[in-house]
Image (cartoon, helix red, strand yellow):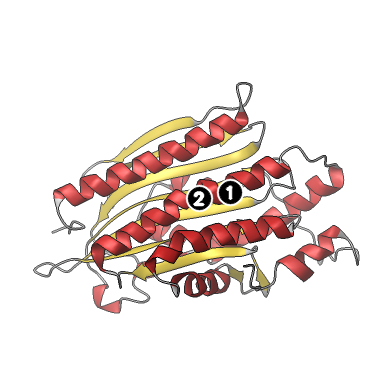
Amino acid sequence: MTPAFNTESTVAQVRQYLVGLQARIIGALEAIEGPEGARAVVDPWHKPAGELLQGDGITQIIEGGRVFERAGCGFSHVRGPQLPPSATQHRPELAGAPFEAMGVSLVFHPRNPYVPTVHMNVRMIAAGHPGQAPVCWFGGGMDLTPYYGFEEDAVHFHRTCHGALAPFGEDKYPRFKQWCDEYFFLKHRNEQRGVGGVFYDDFSELGFERSLAMTQSVGDAFLDAYLPIVERRQHMAYGEREREFQLYRRGRYVEFNLVWDRGTHFGLQSGGRTESILLSMPPLASWSYQRVPEPGSPEAALTQHYLQRRDWL
């Protein structure tokens, strides 16, 4: 038996929302790219019965764009015979249980080093052993990873996150902001990935309807959180120095996603579609041995001032 989230109508409702969210986001990116910019490649996929993981999805990705060097946004709806280890860390009683999951996940890597990389994900998972009612929970959030820091960008991003969560309790933003800071942390570098945002997982405390509404509010807030920053920074002049530093910092992004990210691990461990799982990877990245930025430089300010856990509100 593979459990459903609730009922067939619930699955259809949530699926319709997620597919619509993906379409809205990709439409906004193509509008920023403009008539001469890149269009998204739309790649529907299907995993048939007989494979470890069954289900379908739509991967949409812009590559080589005027504004976005690589911007992937994927929808997936899959079912599997047992939860992978990355999903049972906090729910050991569900180890070995069949599951169903659906969500939208994105990572955008802009071309201009002054435009930050961004990540957003909203998802639901249901799992249950045969003969038991399935347990359903939610996860999601968004976080911002600048290469060159701007105070107003970080403040705007966090204020938008706060506004999305405020209707669901004043405790949600500070809790999820702290969770984001702790989650998007490169333990092997002792370094934050970016300026944070909000993140939550294994969430069901508001009940199904309100937990779903909160997750939709986070998804709906994404464009308001990110697009004004893109519009402010996309035309800033940059040179080889800024581009080279961007590629170096992208290397940190790759390290986090491959070493620590639970979503990447979930997809790979459950037999997911590798091309879609790894759409978060930048097209180019670089590494330098024991690189130390020049004191007082904008590059030094990134780690000293912006990649710190702060109250951005």
Q: Which residue is mark 2?
A: 222
The structure residue drawn at horizontal position 57% and vertical position 67%, both measured from the top left corner, is 184
Instruction: Residue type at mark 2: give it.
Output: Phe
Give the image location of residue 16, x and y in percent: 29, 42
Question: In the rendered view, would you say 137 is above or below 66?
Answer: below
| Secondary-structure class at tag 2 | helix
Instruction: Give the residue at the far left of this rendering.
Output: 131
Q: Mark 2, residues whose alpha carbon is within 10 Å: few (<14), some, or many (≥20)? A: many
The structure residue drawn at horizontal position 31% and vertical position 59%, both measured from the top left corner, is 212
Question: In the rendered view, would you say 197 is above or below 42?
Answer: below
Question: For residue 290, what is the image quadrant?
Answer: bottom right
Q: Is residue 160 left or right of residue 248?
A: left
Give the image location of residue 11, x and y in percent: 22, 49
Give the image location of residue 279, x and y in percent: 51, 45
Q: How many marks?
A: 2
Q: Is residue 312 left or right of residue 264?
A: right
Question: Quick check: marks 2 and 1 in contact, CB under 8 Å?
Answer: yes
| Secondary-structure class at tag 1 | helix
Of 60 and 12, the residue lying toward us:
12
Taking the image as drawn, is residue 304 in sight? yes
Q: Which residue is mark 1?
A: 226
Question: For residue 265, what is the image quadrant?
Answer: bottom left
Question: In the rendered view, would you say 56 is above or below 310?
Answer: above
Of 92 and 71, the residue lying toward us:
71
